[in-house]
Each structure stands twice: as C-alpha cells, then as structure tokens.
C-alpha cells in the first residue's frame, strides 16, 4: 500500500489535517489510520449519557471524508519504519508514505489508586465500543462517583444525573475534586462556584478539596474511600482527571518525545524527521501567552495544529502556530460558562501583574425581553505592563461561547484594553446587552480606567 | 446655572459620555440636557409595538445616571453662546460650561412625498410621547404600510404584525423598499432574502424595487400610491428611511457642519471650538475601513464616540476613534442576521478586490442537539491586496450577534484570513459548531486557500 500522506489517528487533528490537505492539495492521496471503528465527537462524549441517550448519536460520520477522497482504515499500527518511510501494521502489512502526520492523541490519565482495576471503573476513552460499555454499566447504576471536577468530569456528572431522570431511576452522582473548586484550572473562582451551584440544582453532590484514596469492593466496585476516611458508595466510577500525550509510537521509531510534553515539534508542527509532522494532543505545545511549554490539550488546539501541519506539508513551511490557547466553554443546568486564556490564579503563578475589568448586565436590552439572563457576567484580565488582554471569562446565556471567542481572538492578536474599549460592536435588543453596556466593551473600559 | 461639563442630547452618545466622565473624572459636575421626557432605548423602539406592548417598557431608567451624580434636565436649547461658554435655553435661562458635548443625534429623514402631512403618517422619533401617538394610531389600524426596508423598517413591520396577532386584530402590513432587497445596504443579498422570507412567514408583504410616490386620502391617510400607479390601502404609514445629522444648533453657533456629514470633528471628537466636542449621530465620521467620510449612524458608534469625547475632554487628547464600523444585527421570525463592515456590493463600489470565505454548518455538534440551527451561515470578505478582513455576515441562531463581533473586532484590528484561520476558538456541543468547523475559523480558511 502507498499513500502520499498517511495520518495516524482519526480524531480532531487527524481529520482536520485530512480535510485541509484535500482543500490545499487535492491531487494528493490521503489515508487516515485509526484503531477505533468510528470517531466519536470528542467534546460530545458526556452528552451520550444524558441528552443523546445513544453512543451512535455522537459519531463523526465518515461519509463526508470519504466523499472528499480520503481513505479511512481501521488498523493497529505497530511501528513506523522511518528509513523506508512506511507505517507497519500489527499484522505485518505496511503502507508507504511520502509525508506522515502523527495525531495519535492522548490517553486518559489513570491515577495510581488501590483498586483501580475493579469492574465498573472507567476512564473516558474516545472509542465507541468502550463508551458503550460505560453506557451499559451506568444504566442500572444507582450510585455513581465521578473522580475529577474538570470539564469532562462536571459534564459527565450532570449528564449521568440526567440519564437517571430520563429513565426514572434516581442516580446519586458525586463529583470528587482535589482542588478547592471544580473547573479551577480554566475558570475564575466565582464562575466555578456558579457551575457547582448548577450541579447541585440538578442533584449532583460536589465534594471539593477531596482526594480519592482507594476504590473498594470485592472485584466489583462498592465505593470510593477518601483520604479523610469517608467512604462514598458507588456502583460505578468514572475517572476524568486529564490526559497524557500518546507518544508510544513516536518513541518507538526514535522521534524526540516525552510523556509530559508530547512529541517534539517546531512551530510548523514538524518533528525532528522532516517527513513527519505531529499535531493535536500528542504534539508538544507552547502557550500563546507566555511562550512556555503548555499542557493544554483541546480539540480546538488540535484542529488548528492539524490544519497547520497539513498546510506546511503540502506547500512548504509557511504556516506557524500562534501557540496553544485554552479556550473553553460548558453549560451545566441553565448556566453557560466560557473562558479564554489565563485566570487570576494562573497569571499570579506566572508572576504577571494584571488589572481586571468586569461587568454584570443583562444579555438583552431592555432586560425583560425573552431569553434574557439578567446577570450575564464578563471578567477580563489585562497585563499591567503592556495593557494586553490575557484572559476572558463569561457566564450567562448560550452566546457565552461566541462572546468569549471575541476575547480569544483579542488575546491571539495582542489587543489592549484601550482597543477593546473603543471598538464598535453589533448589539440588538433580542440578542445582546445594550450598546452602552455591551459586555466586552464595558469590561475593557472598566479596566482601561485603571490602567491609565 | 453652571456645570463643568454640559451635554446636549440624552441618547447613546450623551449618556455614554456622562457615564465615562463619572468614571474618569468623578469630581466634575455633569449635566445632560434633553428635550424629551425620557430616553427610549433606541434599538428597542420597534419592539414597543409587538413584544413589549408598551412605550414605557422601552425606556432607559434615569436612576442609574442620577445615582452617579449626573444631572438630567428636560429643556429646549435655543443657542450656544460660545464667547460666554454657556448654553441658552428657550426661556432665556443659561447654563455655563467649562466643556460642552453636543450629542443632538439625528432627525428621521422625511421624504418629499405628496401627502406627507396627512394624519397617521409617522416617522420613528426617539421621543416617548411621539412613540405613544404612533402606538395609539397603530392599535386599531388594519392596513399598515412601512416605507423603507432597512433595519428599522423591517423590525417595525414584523412587530406591527405581531401587535395585531397579540390583539386578535389581523393587520395587513406591507414593507416598501426602493432597492432590490430589504437590508441591502448592510447585508449580503442571500441574507437579505432570508429576512424577507421570515417577514413573509409572519404575514408581512414585502415589495422591493418599489418607490412610494404619493400618500393619498382626505386629511387622513387612505393609501400609498406607488410609482407604477398601484395603490396600497393604508390606515397608517410608518416611514423609516434613514436619518440626518441634527446640526441646527451647531450651525447656529457657528461651528463647521453640513447636513450630509454632520458637525465636523477630528479623530478626538473635538470640534473647531476647543471647548466643544461632538459625538454620535450628529458628528462627522469616517469609515474605519476606507478612511472616507461615512454616513453610518448607529448607537454602537455613538456609544464609542461618547466615550472617546468624554475621555479626551477630561484628560487631554489621548483617545482616538478608529472610525465608524457598520456592525448590525437583527432577528426576524426565527432567523437572526448580523453584519459587520462591507458587503460584496459596497466593496465592489469602492473598487476593492476581495475574496470570499463561506461556511454553512449547524451551530451545535452534533447537529441534532437542542437549539440547533442546521444551516447557520457565515460569509467573510477579505481584501485581495493585503488579506485583511473587511466584512462579515452571519445568519442563524441568536449568537449571530456575538459571532459577528468576532469579525467586528478582527476588522478593527486589521486581522488577516491566515490569522483568523489558525486561531483557536472555544467550542461546545450545546453552544457552537464543532472545533473542525467553527464558523469563523473555517470560513477564514476557505478564503485563505484562495488568497495563497
């Protein structure tokens, strides 16, 4: 077998790379190799268990890619023969490449807990067959413990509670988070609190400052023992405490990589081998704000990196990454929360002095119009030394995600408080705050006043 | 009477200037003079007639301004005595100023139609007493003609139809637009068509390429005669065909001003008189894209200009306007449409060569999730000579307005297709398209491919 470009891994980075190649160099043959039967929509996984109710409602359809002439193979890759420029499958078959993209993603981090191998203890893997096993186990479960209160943990907990409501089976769901608040790595503390409140409203118990110590039970899981000795009953446990770059294959074929940072790439997403690029969760990253190595692993970053790798691979090294930006959003209960860039906490840890501009105002004008969230909030962080925005946090209505993308754009373009304050923004009574108090504008002005 | 700063005009520019002064120079006394009893929310006016059902549900409350120590007077201004630095009221009273801001706004344009002075023929004035008269006249009307298919006309037509539905009185509402499409100055033609379709769905008749020639009837309005001889029955007519800078006072006191461009100001919003600033609809503007004089009159532009005038007035000329940007959004029926910057038509008229990047994809992922608009669209325009974005058009869900503000920000920051394509954006299954197809990213990439 031979393909001009071979892509190992069929999630965000790999798929985006393939689409980009077909757009930029349609004459090239492109083959994606993945080890799962279908690619789940990564961010949609929690919603399988609640809103969607089926694993197969959360799959990325292959047809769109096949229609573009992209070949998708389900195979296990054993090795990369760099000397011969071929990917070696577990059955000994080979596929030759002209250029290779490694987008092997990440593996859920499995904590070294006693009892971790008991039945009904799961991580969140991007494999539909595995996700179905989780579904089957969660369906009858009455007591579910989610270890980890980051985005995946919070969303899984909410959706498992909803799964119970939909089936008329009350599920006691508990989230355990080591830090003082859920979502604390991404969000300002007051926004974390809002999400915790929403979780409680949908019946999820939230335990923060709380460390799981042991999974107990005879074979099957019976409970989670905490560091303080407390035992929480559990018929099923879901672990969502982060992910590690999947670098096994890269290491095996001699590329520079380490478990913490991933496969070493330059700003063109090229590895030490000029014919091999890496993109997505498996590739090394630097922060677009500090320039330092970054542990951010997100589908949005992966999509961008896949696009960059594919562009450079077909037309020479011309496209560069701006560095990884943490740009997140989630919705729990009736509250949407979004974040881009730094929190007060992370900026302080980096020794960056900053000024805050905040606004709370309805997202409709007047505020009694339909769809109004009366206390939609924004909080912006600007560096004191150069006035540039380094973080933005929004909570309120469903437009939070698009609103935070104004800030994501501004962070990546190094815009200042002054620029964001005097810029003009579209407003409408049925969609936004008033032109006198559009969130981004007014928060930037409130910071600009302090920065004079 | 004496006030450190006197502001003539109490709508967007004036109110924003007052708030900015209290933020930046709280020690200064600030007086707003207006000739109306209350300030209506300008963009909310159409919704008085439908969703809100009452004029007084669409007022900006004075209390927030009074609480900041801002004085609001309802007085008619007769003249400005520049030599003596005083505003002269119609009763001869005077108020001295140290600095003056003229924010007298605009007057609805009244076309030179025969029969224009018949009863039940209205413009859209920012005066609650007048708006109540319109309300009273529209309430029993069975046949309403709206002359002008811009934002105000389209929104008035939709809301008057709704007014009828709410009262159980079927109203036959017709919009007359001279151009080939409604909203054509702001929106791409395909988006105009969507809005026209929505209007038809809510029962509004849309007549484009259509010129009103005469308003007929004996005293009271009976119908609108078109240039082609057709007569449309009307018990009431609403005219919304644009506005003219209100420069009467400026002319009277000898400031440079003309009816087309408004009161001449520099980029600091200062007039020829160093102690007088002007901001909002009454002030001259230049386009942030072409640098040429601009006729854009919007509350968002006014708010920005009010903020700039107030900042410079209290701390020296340090804040500059970026120039006016047309950033609009509206919602008709179930469709939200938003626009920032140029259309294909206006760019062509300016002789600017451009490349288009478009995407249509659901605003949820997967697309069957609640709240999904399956055909949310974005269309971006980039200059061919420097790759910079000059226009953005969005239609679909309610987040259209915030999404177009990503583009508004990008236009004002001179970002390129390449930058917008490789940037990272927050996405979420319940709020946005997938990270592989986030509208702004993918449309920028689709243009970047053509710009290579």
Image (spheres, coloured by chain):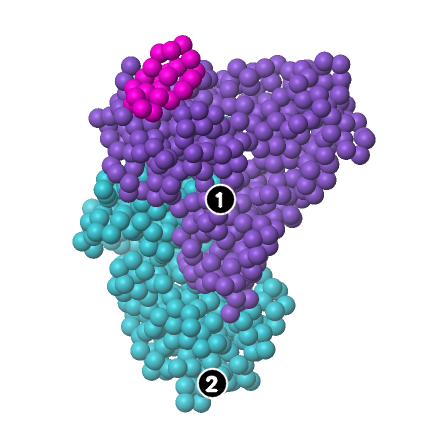
Chain colours: A cyan, B purple
Residue most toward the right? B229
Q: Is residue B90 magenta?
A: yes
Magenta span of residues: B69-97
Label 2 resides on the chain identified as A
What residue lies at 59% left-to-right and 78% top-to-bottom?
A27
What residue lies at 27% left-to-right and 18% top-to-bottom?
B2
Q: Is residue B320 above or below residue B5?
A: below
Q: Is residue B146 above or below residue A397?
A: above
The residue labelled by disc 2 is A86
How many neighbours does mark 2 have within 10 angstroms: few (below 14), some (14-19), or many (20 or more)?
many
Nearer to us: label 1 or label 2:
1
Q: Secondary structure at mark 2?
A: strand
Q: Nearer the viewer, residue A74 or A70?
A: A70
Q: Quadrant of the N terminus of chain B?
A: top left
Q: Secondary structure at mark 1?
A: loop
Left or right: B249 in relation to A261 = right
What kind of secondary structure does the magenta stretch mostly adopt? strand
The answer to which image quadrant residue B26 occupies is: top left
How many neighbours does mark 1 have within 10 angstroms: few (below 14), some (14-19), or many (20 or more)?
some
Q: Is residue B80 magenta?
A: yes
Left or right: B304 in relation to B47 = left
What residue lies at 44% left-to-right and 77% top-to-bottom?
A316
- Give coordinates of residue A199: x percent, y percent: 38, 39
- Give coordinates of residue A285: x percent, y percent: 33, 66
Quick check: can you spot residue B222?
Answer: yes
Residue most toward the top? B91
- Give coordinates of residue B67: x percent, y percent: 30, 20
Q: Are marks 1 and 2 in contact (CB under 8 Å)?
A: no
The residue labelled by disc 1 is B293
- Give coordinates of residue A336: x percent, y percent: 42, 41
């Amino acid at each position: 077998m031979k393909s001009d470009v071979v892509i190992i891994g069929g999630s965000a980075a790999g798929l985006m790379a393939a689409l980009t190649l077909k757009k930029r160099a349609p004459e090239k043959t492109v083959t994606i190799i993945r080890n799962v039967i279908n690619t789940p929509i990564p961010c949609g996984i929690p919603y399988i268990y609640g809103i969607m109710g089926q694993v197969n409602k959360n799959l990325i359809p292959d047809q769109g890619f096949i229609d573009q002439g992209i070949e998708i193979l389900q195979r296990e890759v054993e090795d990369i023969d760099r000397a011969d420029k071929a990917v070696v499958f577990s059955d000994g078959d080979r596929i030759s490449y002209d250029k290779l993209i490694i987008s092997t993603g990440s593996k859920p981090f499995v904590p070294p807990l006693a009892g971790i191998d008991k039945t009904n203890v799961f991580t969140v893997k991007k494999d539909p067959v595995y996700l179905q096993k989780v579904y089957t186990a969660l369906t009858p479960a009455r007591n579910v413990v989610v270890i980890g209160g980051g985005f995946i943990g919070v969303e899984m907990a909410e959706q498992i509670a909803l799964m119970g409501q939909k089936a008329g089976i009350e599920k006691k769901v508990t989230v355990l988070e080591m830090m003082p608040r859920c979502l604390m790595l991404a969000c300002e503390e007051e926004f974390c609190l809002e999400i915790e409140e929403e979780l409680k409203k949908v019946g999820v118990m939230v335990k923060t400052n709380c460390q799981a110590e042991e999974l107990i039970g005879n074979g099957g899981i019976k409970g989670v023992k905490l560091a303080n000795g407390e035992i929480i009953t559990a018929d099923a446990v879901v672990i969502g405490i982060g992910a590690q770059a999947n670098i096994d294959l890269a290491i095996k074929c001699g590329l520079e990589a380490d478990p913490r940072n991933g496969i070493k790439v330059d700003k063109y997403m090229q590895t030490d081998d000029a014919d091999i690029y890496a993109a997505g969760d498996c590739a090394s990253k630097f922060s677009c704000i500090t320039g330092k190595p970054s542990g951010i692993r997100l589908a949005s970053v992966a999509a961008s990196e896949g696009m960059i790798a594919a562009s450079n691979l077909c037309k020479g090294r011309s496209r560069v990454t701006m560095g990884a930006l943490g740009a997140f959003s989630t919705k729990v209960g009736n509250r949407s929360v979004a974040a881009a860039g730094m929190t007060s906490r992370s900026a302080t840890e980096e020794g960056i002095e900053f000024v805050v501009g905040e606004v709370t105002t309805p997202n409709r004008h007047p505020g009694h119009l339909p769809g109004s969230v009366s206390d939609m909030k924004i909080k912006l962080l600007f560096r004191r030394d150069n006035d540039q925005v380094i973080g933005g946090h929004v909570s309120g209505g469903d437009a939070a995600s698009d609103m935070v993308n104004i800030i994501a754009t501004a962070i990546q373009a190094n815009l200042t408080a002054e620029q964001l304050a005097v810029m003009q923004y579209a407003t409408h009574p049925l969609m936004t705050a008033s032109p006198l108090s559009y969130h981004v504008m007014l928060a930037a002005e409130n910071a600009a006043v302090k920065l004079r």
